[in-house]
């Protein structure tokens, strides 16, 4: 037998790292139904509650009636429609960039950019906490990958070489919830003659004027970033992703990004729904303000309980546990108390950095947050709470 599947799965089980799926019996929302039981949902990236917005749902239904269920081909064959062009143009206008290219997922978009741009003669500098889609692509392509300490600009500056390649960071980090120092990243990129690539999947929609994300919050123009990646499966409530940048960059990716050239395009109905989602997100100031109030309320309540949260002002509120078994124990206890929370373990996070990735959404109420805080207060079994206080 050439592959040791059973032994590797058993090893993961013994390490407390085995992954299993749960069957969801309801749509995305502040609560969810699993195995016939209703839970408050603190594990969703639907940060603004867009997935169930009637206007977005209706647009998808309209798109199905007009365009059918699938796109039928890759975008360079017959899979590119007016719905796709309309969405790309609207995104470019929203961010004030020259052009946008749509992808089937954020993972595909990140992989496509790195594989298309970076040649053996190039170098890349990646934040150590970048998403797996970035780190995996970076490790597989022939260009040299340098990893700098998380948000450590001094360490990055010590590694940089002039006009050698790509600096790569997330805007809001998916597992820690903190933000990149984008101005410093841009200054280093511009001074060294390198490009900056920013994946703002978790910032777009939830932050900034009209939801324009981390760069807008930090007072920066999107056009200063050579490569900007965003996704629709989070604050937009649909699915898919995009790359934004100069017209020359988009033309280059259209020709050389194999993940784009050789993949069936996202359905036109999905593009139409996402365009409706963009229009809704731009106007969702009340939802963004409500989400910020919930974040402040939760952090104040957690501090009153003596819990140590990681430093985040975003919808991602990680509670560092340390040990994987402890994280699973705490997540199980919270589910018993009616709160669906996911334990995040290696290899998604570094060894010893297992945590509960608590996500708040605009669909939650203050009462929902109080239920979560009450459940955390009841986790008094010693083992879990020691971890929650960050003792490992």
Image (cartoon, rainbow, N blue to C red):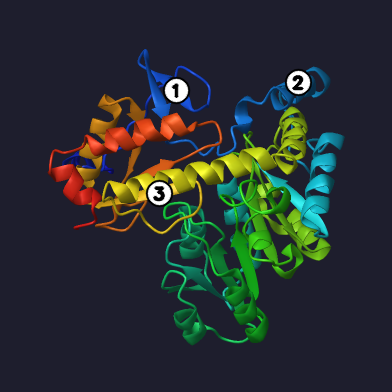
Q: Earlier in the sequence, mark 2 or mark 3?
A: 2
The residue where tag 2 is placed is: 64
| Element type at mark 2 | helix
Q: Position of residue 274 (x, y in %)?
A: 72, 35
- Image quadrant in which you'd find residue 165: bottom right
**For the point 28% across and 38% down, which residue is it?**
376
**280 in relation to 304, above or below:** above
* Numbered disc in front, either 1 or 3: 3
Asked if the residue under mark 3 is in contact with the one under mark 1, i.e. CB atoms within 8 Å, the reply is no
Side of 248 relative to 319 (left or right)? right
Camera-side residue: 321 or 238? 321
Q: Residues within 10 Å of mark 1 (few under 14, many from 20)?
A: many
Q: Position of residue 21 (x, y in %)?
A: 37, 29
Q: Where is residue 100 in the image (x, y as percent from the top left)?
A: 77, 52
Q: Which of marks 2 and 1 is nearer the N terminus?
A: 1
The residue where tag 1 is placed is: 32
Q: Distance between the residues labelled 2 and 3?
A: 42 Å
The residue where tag 3 is placed is: 299
| Element type at mark 1 | strand
- Image quadrant in which you'd find residue 104: top right
**For the point 68% across and 63% down, which residue is it?**
227
Side of 262 relative to 152 (left or right)? right
């Amino acid at each position: 037998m050439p592959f040791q599947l059973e032994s590797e799965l058993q090893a993961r089980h013994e390490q407390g790292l085995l992954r299993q799926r749960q069957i969801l019996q309801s749509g995305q929302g502040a609560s969810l139904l699993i195995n016939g039981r209703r839970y408050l949902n603190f594990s969703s990236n639907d940060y603004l509650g867009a997935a169930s917005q009637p206007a977005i749902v209706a647009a998808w239904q309209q798109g199905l009636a007009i365009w059918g269920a699938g796109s039928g081909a890759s975008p360079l064959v017959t899979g590119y429609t007016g719905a796709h062009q309309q969405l790309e143009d609207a995104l470019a206008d929203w961010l004030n960039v020259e052009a946008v290219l749509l992808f089937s997922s954020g993972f595909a978009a990140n992989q496509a950019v790195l594989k298309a741009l970076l040649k053996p003669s190039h170098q890349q500098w990646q934040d150590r906490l970048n998403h797996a889609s970035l780190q995996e692509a970076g490790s597989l392509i022939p260009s040299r990958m340098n990893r700098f300490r998380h948000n450590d600009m001094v360490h990055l500056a010590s590694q940089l070489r002039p006009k050698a390649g790509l600096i790569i960071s997330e805007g809001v980090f998916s597992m820690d919830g903190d933000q990149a120092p984008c101005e410093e990243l841009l200054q280093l990129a511009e001074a060294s003659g390198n490009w900056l690539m920013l994946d703002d999947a978790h910032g777009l929609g939830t932050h900034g004027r009209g939801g324009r994300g981390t760069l807008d919050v930090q007072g920066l123009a999107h056009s200063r970033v050579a490569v900007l990646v965003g996704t629709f499966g989070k604050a937009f409530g649909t699915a898919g992703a995009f790359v934004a940048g100069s017209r020359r960059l988009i033309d280059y990716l259209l020709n050389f990004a194999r993940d784009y050239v050789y993949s069936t395009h996202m359905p036109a109905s999905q593009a139409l729904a996402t365009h409706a989602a963009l229009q809704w997100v731009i106007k969702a100031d009340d939802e963004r303000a409500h989400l910020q109030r919930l974040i402040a309320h939760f952090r104040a309540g957690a501090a009153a309980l003596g819990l140590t949260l990681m430093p985040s002002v975003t919808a991602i509120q990680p509670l560092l546990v340390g040990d994987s078994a402890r994280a699973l124990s705490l997540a199980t206890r919270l589910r018993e108390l009616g709160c669906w929370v996911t334990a995040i373990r290696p290899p998604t996070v570094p060894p010893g950095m297992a945590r509960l990735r608590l996500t708040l959404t605009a669909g939650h109420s203050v009462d929902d947050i109080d239920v979560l805080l009450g459940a955390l207060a009841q986790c008094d079994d010693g083992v879990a709470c020691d971890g929650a206080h960050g003792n490992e």
